[in-house]
Image (spheres, grey):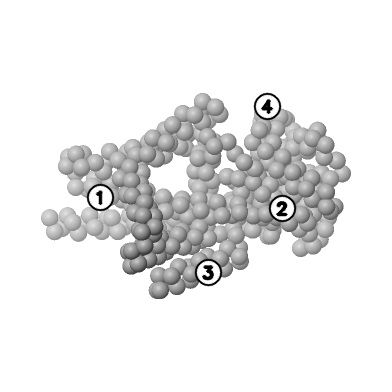
Amino acid sequence: MFFLYLNIAVFLIFALSYWQDRRKIINGFLFNCFLFSLFITLLYFSFSTYNRILVIISLVFLVILGLIGLFGAFALMVASFVNARILIKKEGARFSNFLTLFLGLAILGLLILSSTILANYLPEFMRYVTGFLILLFLYFLFNFLNFFIASFIYQVYRPRLNKDFIIVLGSGLIDGYIVPPLLQNRINVAMDFYLKQAKLHTPPKLLFSGGQGGDEKIPEAVAMQQYALKKGIPIEDTLLEDQSVNTFENMVFSKKIMDRLKGEGHYKSLFATNNFHLFRAGIYAKRAGLTSQGIGAKTAFYYWPNAMIREFIAILALYKKWHLAVVIVMALITIALGIIGYIFT
């Protein structure tokens, strides 16, 4: 019964954390802990009761985990190269589209360095370097899994149809004035919510947020508004925030507009963006002092892996001091082990 109680306790801790604030990385960690404890509980009951169905389910999971352990890195490397090829072919050879390619190359490098054949020819210090790089990769993989789950469960959200504002987050324009498909999806998901609420209550104001980049002819907010007007949204139900240059400023400047119109804390708001960007946007909303949660537009599957890596890097940057401290500690431990190994050999 201990494992069952442990499983329930971990789930309750996760549920409490999620209920308090859905916009936390630790929610992903706690949910992963719950899944792990659930798996341990399943194994315990399977082999303590010898229930045939539970034993079969447990064995299937063990086989899957074994295959991931044996071939997971190679499969991830191949998938990264394939995705990079598709993405670059469809979206162009921009640096931001090379992230899955870089991931594949990093995994290839680690596989080569850690191979038994090569290890026999490496100097002793290079073995420690390889060990450090593998440890570093596992650390960031662990953090990515937590981020991925936190991002996924954040999207499990059905907002009530009682909002005063929907902030639509901007992005780059084609030829300086055309709304690209990715941004169209953001506007469309906001308009869908607008129309649903309009059938029952007073519709929310669509607050288009996005400034004018150096290569853009008009502000992103203006381009988004023009797109919405062509789709039949009344101009009186639209607002513009055309000064922001990043997601945090989207939230800060939009909050100022909403505070001015309704009074701080006297309105209900929502923000709309692409699903891969939803979690980080939620963190920025929290930092800007907004209680807003987000609704996400679907993204083409080929685009999603690279976008998630980009989002993960941005999340790492938000907590860079913590991650830098951990990396330094791992490096110092590796150096210490290397010195000890050198002394005793």
Question: Residue 60's spot in the image, x, y percent?
Answer: 36, 51
Residue wearing tag 3 = 12
Distance from Cα at disc 3 to Cα at disc 1: 41 Å
Select label 2 or label 3 by which is in front: 3
Residue wearing tag 4 = 175
Query: Disc 2 marks which amino acid?
Result: Leu
Select label 3 or label 1 by which is in front: 3
Return the residue found at the far left.
345
Residue wearing tag 1 = 128
Indicate which disc, 3 or 4, sits on the residue closer to the N terminus: 3
Q: Are marks 2 and 3 in contact (CB under 8 Å)?
A: no
Residue at 21 percent of width and 39 percent of height: 118
Residue wearing tag 2 = 270
Query: Disc 4 marks which amino acid?
Result: Asp
SS of the residue under disc 4 = loop
Distance from Cα at disc 1 to Cα at disc 4: 50 Å
Select label 1 or label 2 by which is in front: 2
Indicate which disc, 2 or 4, sits on the residue closer to the N terminus: 4
Q: Do the residues labelled 1 and 2 touch (CB within 8 Å)?
A: no
Query: Disc 3 marks which amino acid?
Result: Leu
SS of the residue under disc 2 = strand
- 281 with respect to 44 (left or right): right
Question: Residue 2's spot in the image, x, y percent?
Answer: 40, 74
- Badge 1: few (under 14), some or many (20 or more) residues near its Cα, within 10 Å? some
Select label 2 or label 4 by which is in front: 2
Select label 3 or label 4 by which is in front: 3
- Is 40 in front, or is 306? 40
Q: Quadrant of residue 263?
A: bottom right
Indicate which disc, 2 or 3, sits on the residue closer to the N terminus: 3
Indicate which disc, 1 or 2, sits on the residue closer to the N terminus: 1
